[in-house]
């Protein structure tokens, strides 16, 4: 019986040994986890965060199917950093950890390059455009201009262009803008962003992010357009629209820059450009175009049938010479909008054919308190659409609009069509 008692004591010691080993194992695991977390945090803090915003855009007609966008584009970026003679990083660096809740960056004051910085650029990057560059002497001369000329100064846009022959890619880097006017009278600042279009086809439309409360925004965003043959680059033009974001109304237009690429030789490498921002070409009050409308009032069903047929002689909405028009139809009862419709967008034409029918229910007997508004707008991706012209038909309308309304009231159940001149939007 004695050996059995001794074996029982050995079994009692086993849980104690297991507990000791388990405690040591837990301490070792926690220590190892803490050490790994510290190493990851220190290695992450030593990395320089990326400051460039790169947009890869697929071309309209041609796209290289064998292109691995991430690997090849990343390799291109490494070679680009090795060879690019641009402005020092300190003036364009954006710390991603300093963004606010909306993803925007705090206001920064870009450093104006000195004469020594300008001399560091490769001479071949400035063919015949050194006269457009901003130097400290030219900035000093601004103080001597008249007050009227100061009001016309809308700032300067800095950008670069480059062509990658291997990928058949045309690249535009919107670097920064300086000296923009304040569009917000209360804060005396702006929330600028830039919309860029490649003309004349208007197939490529892109825009930068909005930078809050700054008159010297540093965007540094690269847009890459694939499928543009090098021999066609000479026929293109870059149109930059500089706007200020407005949360509660239509965005304010600061100005525009038109840069034709004819005569530009991109075979030598990247070219850094700067252009003065000019006032947008505002259309004249006359010549807004015409709209063909057909109306029919059904007194039995108390409905109004509206057919938007055609538009002709529409003015150009931008420097491309064409608009992307569509028509928005609003029905009002006692000056209160009760219904709205819109047509499809017609691309790149001053003479659009819509042929779209809409039926509106009239909430009252007769058309005495009814009016209908037609807004012809230019479709623009990324920004609020611009009004080309408008037309209002109703009992109080004058001219052809008043005559048209009178006829549909006198001859119900008859479809009556008339051309109308559009007025200012």
Image (cartoon, rainbow, N blue to C red):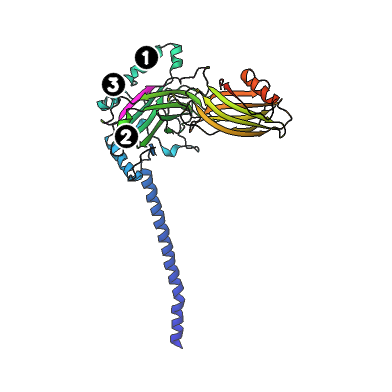
Where is mark 3, residue-wise?
A: 128
Q: Secondary structure at mark 3?
A: loop
- For the magenta stretch, what is the residue range? 269-284
Residue at x-position 30% and y-position 33%? 230
How far is mark 3 from mark 1, CA to CA? 22 Å
Q: Position of residue 328 (x, y in %)?
A: 57, 30
Dots 2, 3 in contact, CB < 8 A: no
- Can you tell which of label 3 and label 1 is closer to the viewer? 3
Q: Earlier in the sequence, mark 2 or mark 3?
A: 3
In the picture of the structure, the residue carrying the numbered disc 1 is: 141
**Where in the figure is residue 32, as x and y percent of width and height?**
39, 57
Nearer-the-camera pick, 36 or 250: 250
Front position among marks 2 and 3: 2
Residue 237 falls in image quadrant: top left
Farthest right residue in view? 365
Mark closer to the chain start, 3 or 1: 3
Per the image, the residue denoted by label 2 is: 229
């Amino acid at each position: 019986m004695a050996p059995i008692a001794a074996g029982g004591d050995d079994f009692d010691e086993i849980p104690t040994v297991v507990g000791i080993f388990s405690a040591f194992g837990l301490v070792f695991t926690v220590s190892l986890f803490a050490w790994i977390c510290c190493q990851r945090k220190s290695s992450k803090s030593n990395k320089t965060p990326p400051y460039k915003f790169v947009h890869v855009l697929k071309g309209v007609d041609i796209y290289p199917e064998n292109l691995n966008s991430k690997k090849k584009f990343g390799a291109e970026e490494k070679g680009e950093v090795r060879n690019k003679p641009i402005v020092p990083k300190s003036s364009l660096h954006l710390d991603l950890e300093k963004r606010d809740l909306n993803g925007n960056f705090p206001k920064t004051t870009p450093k104006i390059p000195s004469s020594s910085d300008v001399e560091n650029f490769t001479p071949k990057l400035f063919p015949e455009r050194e006269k457009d560059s901003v130097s400290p002497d030219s900035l000093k001369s601004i103080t001597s201009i008249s007050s009227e000329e100061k009001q016309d100064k809308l700032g300067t846009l800095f950008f670069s262009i480059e062509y990658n022959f291997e990928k058949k890619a045309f690249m535009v880097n919107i670097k920064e803008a300086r000296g923009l006017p304040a569009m917000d009278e209360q804060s005396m600042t702006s929330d600028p962003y830039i919309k860029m279009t490649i003309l004349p086809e208007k197939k490529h439309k892109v825009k930068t992010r909005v930078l809050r409360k700054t008159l010297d925004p540093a965007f540094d965003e690269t847009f890459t357009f694939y499928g543009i043959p090098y021999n066609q680059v000479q026929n293109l033009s870059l149109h930059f629209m500089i706007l200020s974001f407005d949360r509660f109304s239509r965005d304010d237009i600061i100005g525009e820059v038109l840069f034709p690429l004819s005569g530009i030789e991109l075979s030598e490498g990247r070219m850094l450009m700067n252009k003065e921002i000019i006032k947008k070409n505002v259309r004249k009050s006359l010549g807004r175009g015409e709209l063909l409308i057909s109306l029919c009032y059904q007194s039995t069903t108390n409905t109004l049938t509206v057919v938007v047929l055609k538009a002709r002689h529409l003015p150009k909405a931008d420097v491309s010479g064409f608009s992307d028009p569509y028509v928005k139809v609003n029905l009002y009862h006692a000056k209160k909008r009760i219904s709205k419709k819109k047509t499809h967008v017609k691309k790149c034409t001053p003479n659009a054919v819509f042929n779209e029918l809409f039926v509106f229910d009239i909430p009252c007997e007769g058309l005495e308190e009814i009016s209908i508004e037609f807004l012809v707008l230019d479709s623009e991706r990324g920004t609020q659409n611009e009004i080309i012209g408008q037309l209002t038909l109703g009992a109080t309308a004058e001219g052809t609009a008043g005559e048209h309304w009178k006829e549909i009231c006198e001859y119900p159940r008859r479809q009556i069509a008339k051309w109308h001149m559009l007025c200012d939007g």
